[in-house]
Image: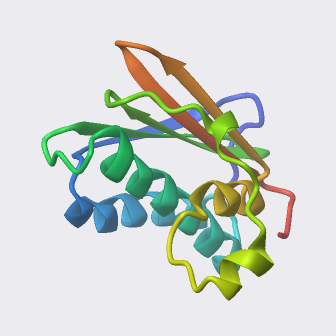
Amino acid sequence: MKTDNKKIREKELVVKSNTTNLSSIRDFVYATALEIGFSSEVVDNIILAVDEACTNIIKHAYKSFPEGEITIKLKYNNKKFTIVIIDHGIPFNPDTIPDPDLQKYYRQHRVGGLGMYLMKSLMDEVKYVSVPGKYNQVLLSKNLNTTH
């Protein structure tokens, strides 16, 4: 599907902060990412990054409170695909999370805790915006001309 380079298209999904809604989020992002031309391998990577971001919101921003709201906005043209994830939970400072020592992590048989690392590895750009008392926003971007 060809879209005008200058015209940014948008789609939006709003769900409650419950892990049962992760499949709806995945389906929503998956369909649009395929539609605009990403390979299925790249789409799988995008889905993994979105899944990590939303799981972190559910577990940490909302402390597993199932009635919080998560808004997923997809913004895209023929050059860039950005997933904007908005919540109204506890703010988060990504600068407090150090890059993991993967060898040590593996030796300790740890599970979980690699979400930030995965998001940064899988996407071309990851940004966090937090307005305390108002909202938190995660922006995950992937350029359409990339193959990784």
Q: Quadrant of the C terminus?
A: bottom right
**Side of 135 where 79 appears, left or right:** right
The answer to which quarter of the image holds residue 70 is top left
The answer to which quarter of the image holds residue 99 is bottom right
**Side of 122 where 84 appears, left or right:** left
x, y percentage for residue 125? 76, 44
Q: Which residue is located at x 21 percent, y 55 percent?
A: 18
Q: Which residue is located at x 55 percent, y 78 percent?
A: 110
x, y percentage for residue 142? 73, 52
From what the image shows, is residue 56 above or below residue 121? above
Seen from the viewer's position, the closer of residues 88 and 108 is 108
From what the image shows, is residue 21 above or below residue 134? below
Seen from the viewer's position, the closer of residues 129 and 26 is 129
Q: Quadrant of the N terminus?
A: bottom right
From what the image shows, is residue 105 above or below residue 31? below
Q: Which residue is located at x 41 percent, y 65 percent?
A: 26
**Side of 17 where 129 appears, left or right:** right
x, y percentage for residue 63? 26, 45
x, y percentage for residue 50? 51, 57
